Image (cartoon, rainbow, N blue to C red):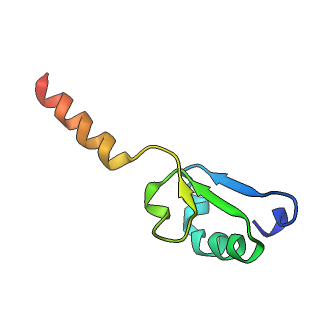
Amino acid sequence: AQSLAGRVEAIYIVTDNTVVSALESVIKVCNQEKIALILADPSTVDKGALASYGIDYFSLGKKSGEIALQV
């Protein structure tokens, strides 16, 4: 995120284990540099991301289970 400071207004990050493992650092830099941070994982909003747009894996799994019960 630091290398993008001054060059972007927002960053969108898909679900990625490498980035998520350093999420606190990414959030800190984005807040300092006033970069909007949007992630695919809805739980990241509680951790400091501005917004999320992506798959809610818990809801997807629950719905998949409901469909499997009908088979």
Look at 78% across and 58% down and name the residue there. 9
Q: Which of the pair 7/20 is nearer the observer? A: 7
Among the 4 quarters of the image, the one containing residue 27: bottom right
Q: Which of the pair 5/68 is nearer the observer? A: 5
> 8 above or below 48?
above
Please provide percent x and percent y for residue 40: 53, 50
Look at 73% across and 77% down and name the residue there. 32
The number of numbered discs placed on residues in the rendered structure image is 0
Please provide percent x and percent y for residue 46: 45, 69
Look at 84% across and 65% down and name the residue there. 3
Look at 29% across and 42% down and name the residue there. 61
Please provide percent x and percent y for residue 48: 54, 71
User: Extreme top residue here?
Assistant: 71
Q: Is residue 13 left or right of residue 44?
A: right
> 55 above or below 35?
above
> 52 above or below 44?
above
> 22 above or below 19?
below
Position of the C terminus by quadrant: top left
Please provide percent x and percent y for residue 1: 75, 65
Q: Is residue 67 left or right of residue 19?
A: left
